[in-house]
Image (cartoon, rainbow, N blue to C red):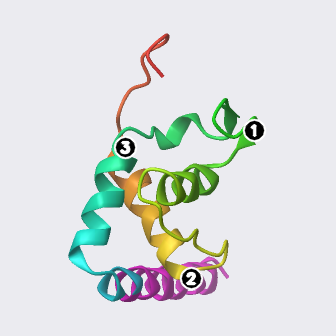
Amino acid sequence: MWLLKWKKRETQYRRERAEFFAAVKRLDRRSFMKVARLAAAVTAETYPKFQTQLQKVAALRDMINWRIENPLKGKPLALDDARLLAFEAYITAQRTGVTLEPGKH
């Protein structure tokens, strides 16, 4: 039973990983680097939280889209877009293991 669950999880992980890399490959380098630089200021572990720019409680994906729309003057990504998932995964991976510092985040 546990082996079946593990295989399902592994299959899901591999599918999501493949979708992530396919989405990253579709981005041109310049676009990826622009959003990655802007996203570096985003601390994934603190979301959802109230964002004054949006005047609402925002999820990480809302902030990514806001950064694409405003500083970059681009079109926001659909919430089910694989590229948005790729950005979320990238930001989360970059922040994995980073300790939250009270008052800083």
> Height in image: 43 above or below 17?
above
Q: Nearer the viewer, residue 20 or 52?
A: 52
For marks 3 and 1 on the same chain, the one whose residue lies earlier in the sequence: 1
Determine whether the residue tagged by mark 1 lies in a helix, strand or loop. strand
Quarter occupied by the N terminus: bottom right
Looking at this view, name the residue that lies furthest to the top.
103
Q: Is residue 104 above or below residue 77?
A: above
Within the image, what quadrant is residue 89 found in? bottom left
Query: Residue sitting at 32 percent across and 56 percent down?
Result: 36
Circle on res. 95: 3
Q: Is residue 41 above or below residue 8?
A: above
For mark 1, does the 10 Å Cα neighbourhood hold few (<14), some (14 to 19), or many (20 or more) residues? few
- For the stretch drawn in magenta, the main secondary structure is helix
Q: CA distance from mark 2 to mark 3?
A: 30 Å
Which residue is found at the position 44% from the left and 85% from the top? Answer: 14
10 Å crowding of disc 3: few (<14), some (14-19), many (20+): some
Q: Amino acid at mark 1?
A: Val
In this orientation, which residue lies closer to the viewer: 77 or 5?
77
> SS class of the residue under badge 3?
helix
**Which of the two discs, 1 and 2, labels the residue nearer the N terminus?**
2
- Residue 27 in the image: state x and y as whole percent: 33, 81
Q: How many marks?
A: 3
Query: Which region is colored magenta?
Result: 1-22
The residue shown at (51%, 52%) is 70
Pick whichever, 17 or 82, lies toward us.
82
Left or right: 31 in relation to 56? left
Q: Which residue is mark 2?
A: 3
**Dot 2 alpha-carbon crowd within 10 angstroms: few under 14, some 14 to 19, many 20 or more:** few
Report x, y in % for residue 13. 49, 79
Q: Which residue is mark 1?
A: 57
